[in-house]
Structure formats: C-alpha cells, structure tokens
Image (cartoon, grey):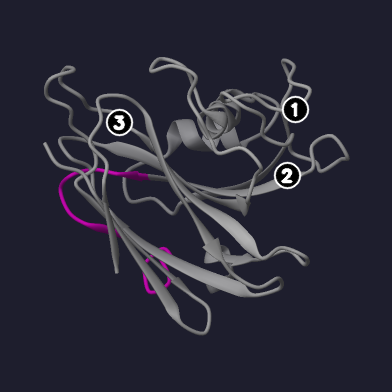
C-alpha cells in the first residue's frame, strides 16, 4: 500500500514508475469520486521517458496535459466528441496516442505544433494508453475489473511492450470545481489496483 497527497489549485499530474517485465499483462480497476462536483481525470500508461513529465510554470502544461488537450480538441477523430458528451460514471473513454519522445521543461524532441498522432511512426514513437474518467461526488464510482462498466475485461488491460522493463503509471487530474488559491478542492480519494500475478495497490488522497 502506498499513499500520496495531491493538494493543488491547478490541473495536476501525479505519476510513478513501476518495474515490470516485457510482455506481462496488467488489468486495472479504479475507484474515483469528485470532491465538490464532477471531476475528470485521465489514467495514462506508457513507456518510461528520459525526462520526467514537467510543467515549465504553474500556468503551463506538462506533456500529458498537452496530450489530453490534443485529444479533446482533435476534431478529426471521434474521441473529442465522446469526451465532450461523457457523463459521470460512464465507461472510461479509451484511446491510444503516439507522441514524440519527451524533452526538458514539458517539451518534446524536435517540438513543433504537431507533437501527437493516432498512428505510430519513427517520429511519433512513444505509445500511450489513455482512459478518460469522469465522476461526480454523489457516490464512489468503480471502473475496470469487477465494475458494472466491465463489459469486456480486455478493455481494462495493458500489455507491456517487448523489450521494456519499466513503465509509467500516471494520473492527470483536471479539477472541474475549485474555489481559489487558498482553498483548493478536487479529488477526495482515488484507489487503483493493477493485477498481474500479484497486485500493486496505490492510494492517492486529496484534502482541503
């Protein structure tokens, strides 16, 4: 059991590198609840980078925030419309995005106005599996294995690519409801379970 407090008044990212073995299959489940309204978060799983995800300033966006923003605003793909119409407790919206390798200060190698793609190439080489989750504060919402949205367990699985022995487990928190800089609000508690041959439990807690 691991715990971390996420107490912010801005969009935030919390991540952890986890050792694994290439080719192993993980199945995840998560419980999520909004704080004082509806909160949206993204669960992202992908390869360890040479540079950690970083915001150059408080008002800037780290690499994963940029990635989710791109998904939301990409009018050439149906995912943006699905995110727009997503309701609290709906089945998480899954998508796969390819990015350039990370660089320093929230940037990408050979950065341009196009840093993401829905297709993998030599330029967009980094594969990220993303699930967009939206939950209100009326109750705990369970997603993944054992949930009412688990129509197919394959939907909540991640297979570690061959040749990789570390991957990045990340939570990007978009706070839909906040007061001011002195009284931040957001997610109360988020619990995730990753199962392979054993389970890793991670608890993230946010307090007033």
Label 3: few (<14), some (14–19) or many (≥20) C-alpha neighbours in 10 Å: many
SS at mark 3 in the image:
loop
Q: Mark 2 or 3, which is nearer the eye?
A: 2
Q: Is residue 140 magenta?
A: yes
The residue at the point 88 percent across, 40 percent down is 122
Q: Nearer the viewer, residue 197 or 92?
A: 197
Q: Nearer the viewer, residue 170 or 32?
A: 170
SS at mark 2 in the image:
strand
Give coordinates of residue 198: x percent, y percent: 46, 82
Q: Is residue 85 visible?
A: yes
Residue matched to label 2? 126
The residue at the point 62 percent across, 27 percent down is 104
The residue at the point 27 percent across, 41 percent down is 6
Start-end of magenta stretch: 134-150
Image height check: is 171 above or below 154? above
Numbered tag placed on residue 109 in the rendering = 1
């Amino acid at each position: 059991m691991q715990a971390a407090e996420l107490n912010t008044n801005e969009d935030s990212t919390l991540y952890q590198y986890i050792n694994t073995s290439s080719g192993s299959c993980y199945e995840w489940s998560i419980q999520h609840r909004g704080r004082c309204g509806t909160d949206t978060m993204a669960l992202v799983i992908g390869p360890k980078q040479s540079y950690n995800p970083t915001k150059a300033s408080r008002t800037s966006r780290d690499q994963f925030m940029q990635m989710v923003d791109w998904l939301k605003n990409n009018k050439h793909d149906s995912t943006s419309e699905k995110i727009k119409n997503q309701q609290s407790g709906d089945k998480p919206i899954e998508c796969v995005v390819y990015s350039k390798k990370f660089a320093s200060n929230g940037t990408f190698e050979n950065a341009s106005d196009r840093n993401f793609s829905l297709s993998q190439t030599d330029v967009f080489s980094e594969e990220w599996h993303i699930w967009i989750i939206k939950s209100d504060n009326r109750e705990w919402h369970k997603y993944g294995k054992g949930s009412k949205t688990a129509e197919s367990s394959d939907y909540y699985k991640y297979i570690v690519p061959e040749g990789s022995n570390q991957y990045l487990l990340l939570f990007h928190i978009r706070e839909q409801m906040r007061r001011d800089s002195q009284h931040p609000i957001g997610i109360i508690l988020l619990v995730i379970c990753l199962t392979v041959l054993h389970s890793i439990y991670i608890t993230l807690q946010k307090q007033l």
